[in-house]
Image: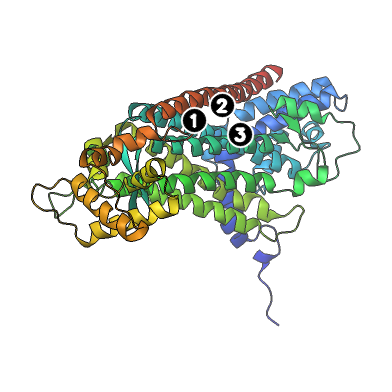
Amino acid sequence: MKKRSNSSSAFPHPIYLSTVLKSNFQHSVTRFFEPLVEINQAHAIMLAHSGIIAQRHAATLLKALGQIGKERKKLECYSFTGLEEDLFFYVERRLANLCGADLSGHLSVARSRNDVDITLYRMVLRKELLQTASQVHRLQRVLLDLAQSHVRSVFPVVTHTQFAQPTTLGHYLMATVEFLHRDLARLMESYHTVNQCPLGACVATTTGFSIDRSLLGRLLGFDTILENAYGCIASVDYLLESVGTVSTLMVSLGRFVQDLLLWSSQESGLLILPDGFVQGSSIMPQKRNPVALEHLRILASNAVGQCQAVVLGLHNTPFGDIVDAEDDIQPTVRAVFEYSERVLELSKAVLEAAEFNVGKALSKCRSGEITLTELADWLVRNRRLPFRTAHRIVSQVGKSLRARPARRRGEPQSQRISTLLQVASQTVAGTAILVAPDLMSSILDPVQFVEARKVFGGPSPRTVERSIARRRTLISRQERWLQEKKGVLDTYARQLNRLS
């Protein structure tokens, strides 16, 4: 029988070290070092406050932790050899070196890697959620200002890739503001889910020591503490909710970017990007490729892909402590927010610089059948026809226009449609309806089409202006929430340092 290699008998196996522990250690150094030191500081303060360790021991531990906290750059150059399994044990070893193993061992009472790790993940994730929420807020501001400047810019609505009706660019942009408002609300709710402290859960059943879990939460800037100790360790819904929220945001933004990209085509010509966001060709000197928008689309798709990877990684895992929900999935979670941050930053810059060809947009709205809905509505209002009958008549007009698109020289479009209406109404309703060309021109005017739609949520400039005013108020409330949460995260760290 072949003898096994001695290298397999001791932990960690060299392959396990190189494929798992080393990369996880480096990721932890980059992302989790600062919050780990803060968790240790908070735990020392709480143990002393609860009378579990002596105040003098806590003071020594806090002094040593302060020194370790200053070793970030040194640690980034540290050559990980597996002497300690992970960052948690590295800090524990450094603490023992600085103040002795017996004294440093006091810090291990009433805690586990389990609750420490979950707390680390939540502390980093809450910052990422807050950063994303702040970027969404700033993008909303840009879109609101853009919408304000285009409340009267008539623009074609496209449904099923075909021109449908006129609206205004301001009205369209307000739709993006509204979905971003909902995205920001979801990010705020996700922040609330994440910012609950699991410390004190230990392995999954708390401890026999009389610790103060509420104090731990307050010291680390959490809004509240998670109650059930098993759920503290086993639950992954905080991760799923967070990446799900980002996934929804990226899908919505990706669809918006797709519109912008279509508007940038030569056939459309409705959007012009400045030179800083376009790319030339290595062979075709005339090319102006709107590559910033193409990058936005794939970056958003990459973010969604990372979100799905998180969900798939956690799907069908046991409801308990399991490595699938720990170190190995954390880089994927980070990638979600890294991609989304790039999308939001670039989107804001592109929209601040973009120029919309509103003259061409108006021309497109005047050149086709895009306002025929209003003709059907006019027949209902002024000829008392049932809408379905009016729809059949105007549909016949539209078919005739498409069948014979060319007009006789000098014949206005309004005159042609008036003639076609007479024929269609005679055929469908048995009575020819006469509408003078001047009146027909007014009925089909896209500016009038937009002005007439004053219903709440419609594109009438006054309606959109009222919507913008309401939205500014709502956004200001969200801004206050963002400032409050940023203030809490800034304050707890300063207070923790003072107590240390």
Alpha carbon separation for disc pair 3 and 2: 9 Å
Classify residue 482 as left or right of residue 455.
Answer: right
Q: Which residue occupies 33% across, 45% down?
A: 375
Q: Is residue 349 visible?
A: no
Classify residue 206 as left or right of residue 198.
Answer: right
The residue at which mark 2 appears reads as: 478
Amino acid type, residue under disc 3 in the picture: Met
Q: Is residue 454 above or below residue 401?
A: above
Which residue is more in the foreground, 133 or 148?
Answer: 148
* Mark 2 surroundings: few (<14), some (14-19) or many (≥20) residues within 10 A: some
* Mark 1 surroundings: few (<14), some (14-19) or many (≥20) residues within 10 A: many
Alpha carbon separation for disc pair 1 and 3: 11 Å
The residue at which mark 3 appears reads as: 188
Which residue is more in the foreground, 218 or 48?
Answer: 218
First reached walking from the N terminus: tag 1 or tag 3: 1
Image x and y of residue 108, in percent: 79, 37
SS for callout 3: helix
Q: Is residue 428 above or below residue 34?
A: below
First reached walking from the N terminus: tag 2 or tag 1: 1
First reached walking from the N terminus: tag 3 or tag 2: 3
SS for callout 1: helix
Image x and y of residue 364, in percent: 24, 45
Report the residue that reaches farthest toward the right.
208
Q: Which mark is residue 137?
A: 1
Which residue is more in the foreground, 470 or 5?
Answer: 470
Which residue is more in the foreground, 249 or 109?
Answer: 249
- Asked whether disc 3 touches disc 2, contact meaning CB atoms under 8 Å apart, the reply is yes
- Asked whether disc 2 touches disc 1, contact meaning CB atoms under 8 Å apart, the reply is yes
SS for callout 2: helix
Amino acid type, residue under disc 2 in the picture: Gln
